[in-house]
Amino acid sequence: MGRAPCCDKNGLKKGPWTPEEDLKLINYIQAHGPGNWRTLPKNAGLQRCGKSCRLRWTNYLRPDIKRGRFSFEEEETIIQLHSILGNKWSAIAARLPGRTDNEIKNYWNTHIRKRLLRNGIDPVTHAPRLDLLDLSSLLSSSLCNPPLINMANLLKTQALLNPELLRLASTILSLKNENPDLLSQNNLQENHISDPNAFPLSHSNQFQVQAQSQAQQVPACTTSTLPCGPLVDQAQLGQANVGDFPSNLPSNFSCSNTGQIIVPPMESQDLVSQPHYIQGNSSPAMPASLEKLCHFQPNNGDDQNFRFDSIMSTPLSSSTPLNSSSTFVNSSSEEERESYCSSFFKFELPESLDINDFMC
DNA sequence: AAGATTTGCAACCGCCTTTCG
DNA sequence: CCGAAAGGCGGTTGCAAATCT
């Protein structure tokens, strides 16, 4: 029964490949094609396991492999796809012509993951991290109503859902109500000058925070948005040949045409354990203004440059590179990429937003 | 200059699914 | 239909190069 044994593991070489071995493998595959990996090493005169040959070929020797630094577009695509697919490196690689799953996995672990962490974004959930709160800027954020907030500031807004922080905020805000001069605009502006991350203060009278004692009863109701292009529908997802979506991805998952992905109310620990995706309109527990907040606007200036749906629907066989000119060429600095990555997660906050709606 | 530490990545390991006898 | 190997995939490791002290 069953097949013949793959190969005798005794006496097979391991470790780095030599140029001679590479040459043998390349020559054999060019002459005969990959064929049966089990018999290939013997036929090619290699003292290697077939599995090792396959890996060497698919990850390194294949002629269509693009090497060199990842372009902005590729990096953006990886982040977008990872927010949907998770660690499905092969599925992500299928959308990046010339890149292997191993290369993408390595790049994620060594570059993107670290950058997201530095920017206060959980690389697993793509949500802001709740353990990186800065109360001072939280308060200055809450006392103002900026037209735009970035992910870091959204994170601080979410901190209002932390009962302990809420209590503290409530105390300070009640002081403010009793003593408006205490936190006057001038004082805030001074604070703003000293803290480049603080909000601009031109709308400070529009974003009234009325911290309430009932806020301590706030359930772990939070939201997050994930980067997503304008439209992904079921048909496109199916067409994308990504049947290997995470098993926890609900069947009604979708992105709105503003590119929003809604994370429903959840236990706080869930926020860091796994991503949640649901259809924005179907979340009965979500206040209307919370949904407003969730309208994500990719802040790359021109979302025509990146259409998530177009990537998701690009057939695997498509050879259209995302950035064909980027091969071997990418002179941008880490700082530029970090800045880009940070701005990538910006949100538009409706001016009519009333924070009371957050207080569940 | 030299040792220590960090970083990047090729390759391996082990598990799961698919294929085949 | 069953069971074992092949194939595929994600996680992890080991080592060389780069950077820091």
Image (cartoon, coloured by chain):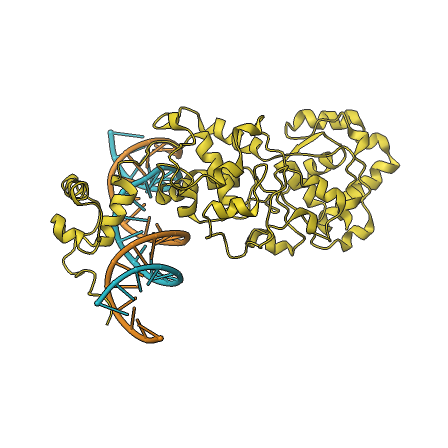
Chain colours: A yellow, B cyan, C orange
Q: Would you place residue B14 above or below residue B1 in this image?
A: below
Residue A174 is left or right of residue A241, and the answer is right
Query: Where residue A165 sits in the image (x, y, percent)?
Result: 72, 47
Query: Where residue A36 sits in the image (x, y, percent)?
Result: 21, 53
Query: Where residue A255 sits in the image (x, y, percent)?
Result: 60, 43
Res A123 visible? no
The quadrant holding residue A185 is top right
Residue B15 is left or right of residue A239, and the answer is left
The quadrant holding residue A7 is bottom left
Query: Where residue A167 sits in the image (x, y, percent)?
Result: 77, 48
Task: Please identify the residue farthest to the right as the structure is shown.
Answer: A178
Q: Nearer the viewer, residue A139 or A313?
A: A313
User: Which residue appears at 69% of the width and 38% of the height?
Assistant: A138
The quadrant holding residue A3 is bottom left
User: Which residue appears at 52% of the width and 41% of the height?
Assistant: A117
User: Which residue appears at 69% of the width and 54% of the height?
Assistant: A220
Residue A110 is left or right of residue A120, and the answer is left
